[in-house]
């Protein structure tokens, strides 16, 4: 989805940024560092905005480069996106973020979306965080994701093609794999 | 006369070289500051994970989402005329990460 949005945004004043949450990185992935990663991607796009450079120099003077607090990060981010026509923020696997940080991040996004009408947010996650997301974004558009039969078949074909020991499988087994797995998945 | 020309010539090339060096140094200084700023903003490197997903993704899988009306509206509609938040939810392993 990030790539499709990027293709669409190419050449326009539209930024597409992506964040991936990971159980194994729960400690590092705080709301602040996640929002910081959005800024990082914006800074990488072009010149460093003056207000970010100033904030950095100030932090450097004050405490040898102390990090930003969440509220400061939100303010800087809000300012950084005002010059854009639109920004798409895509956050994958929100459920993998530590619960405390997840709520902080949702709250921050809620505030930013309210103020910045040029911001769109795409979240993906498991159904159990549905209530949480709805609490912050009661009108969010929900798209349930389930693979189509064609998706499953394409994936299986790819995996069979890349099988390291193809001779271990005869044509019958191959046919069974292609038939049974898609059937079972659609029963899930 | 020709000796003087020579000197000016040399001086000029020296200047050019010097200017060039200055430019390089300023650029290097800005780059170093930029790297510091990037590190200061966040230790996370989501681009790396994105490259991994891009490489492993199977083309055409999940394309139905891109055709989905709700998704298209969310992408294309002007600001203020569409709900800005889209939530794709699904069980583990259904391929949410790998939607193109």
Image (tube, coloured by chain):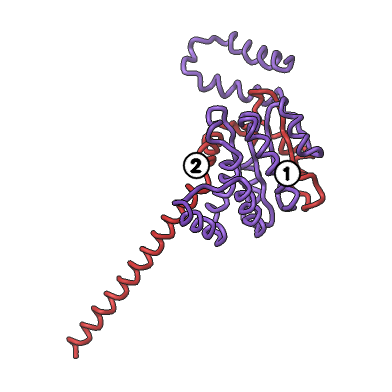
Chain colours: A purple, B red
Disc 1 target residue: A110
Q: Number of numbered discs present?
A: 2
Q: Are marks 2 and 1 in contact (CB under 8 Å)?
A: no
Q: Quadrant of the N terminus of chain A?
A: top right
Q: Chain of mark 2?
A: B
Q: Which residue is mark 2?
A: B43
Up-down relation of residue A13 to residue B47 (above or below): below
Neighbourhood count class around disc 1 (C-alpha, 10 Å): few under 14, some 14–19, many 20 upward:
some
Identify whether A30 is placed above or below B81: above
Front-lying residue, A21 or B48: A21
Q: Give the quadrant of the C terminus of chain A.
A: top right
Identify the residue at the far front of this view.
A62
Res A99 seen here: yes
Residue at figure coordinates x 59%, y 13% from the top left = A174
> Is A83 drawn above or below residue A87 in the view shown?
below
Question: Residue furthest toward the left?
Answer: B3
């Amino acid at each position: 989805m990030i790539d499709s949005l990027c293709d669409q945004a190419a050449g326009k004043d539209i930024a597409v940024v992506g964040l991936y949450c990971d159980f194994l990185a729960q400690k590092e992935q705080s709301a602040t560092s996640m929002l910081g990663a959005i800024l990082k991607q914006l800074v990488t796009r072009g010149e460093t905005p003056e207000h970010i450079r100033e904030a950095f120099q100030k932090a450097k003077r004050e405490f040898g480069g102390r990090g930003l607090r969440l509220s400061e990060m939100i303010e800087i981010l809000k300012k950084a996106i005002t010059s854009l026509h639109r920004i798409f923020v895509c956050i994958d696997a929100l459920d993998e973020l530590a619960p405390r940080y997840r709520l902080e991040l949702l709250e921050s996004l809620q505030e930013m979306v309210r103020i910045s009408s040029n911001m769109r947010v795409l979240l993906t996650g498991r159904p159990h965080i549905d209530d949480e997301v709805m609490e912050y974004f009661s009108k969010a558009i929900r798209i349930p994701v389930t693979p189509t039969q064609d998706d499953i078949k394409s994936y299986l074909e790819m995996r069979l093609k890349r099988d390291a020991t193809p001779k271990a499988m005869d044509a019958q087994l191959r046919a069974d794999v292609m038939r049974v797995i898609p059937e079972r998945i659609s029963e899930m | 006369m020709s000796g003087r020309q020579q000197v000016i010539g040399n001086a000029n090339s020296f200047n050019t070289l010097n200017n060039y060096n200055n430019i390089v140094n300023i650029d290097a200084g800005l780059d170093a500051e930029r790297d510091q700023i990037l590190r200061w903003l966040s230790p996370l490197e989501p681009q790396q994970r994105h490259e991994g997903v891009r490489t492993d993704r199977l083309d055409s899988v999940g394309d139905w989402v891109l055709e989905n009306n709700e998704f298209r509206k969310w992408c294309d509609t002007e600001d203020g005329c569409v709900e800005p938040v889209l939530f794709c939810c699904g069980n583990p392993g259904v391929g949410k990460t790998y939607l193109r």
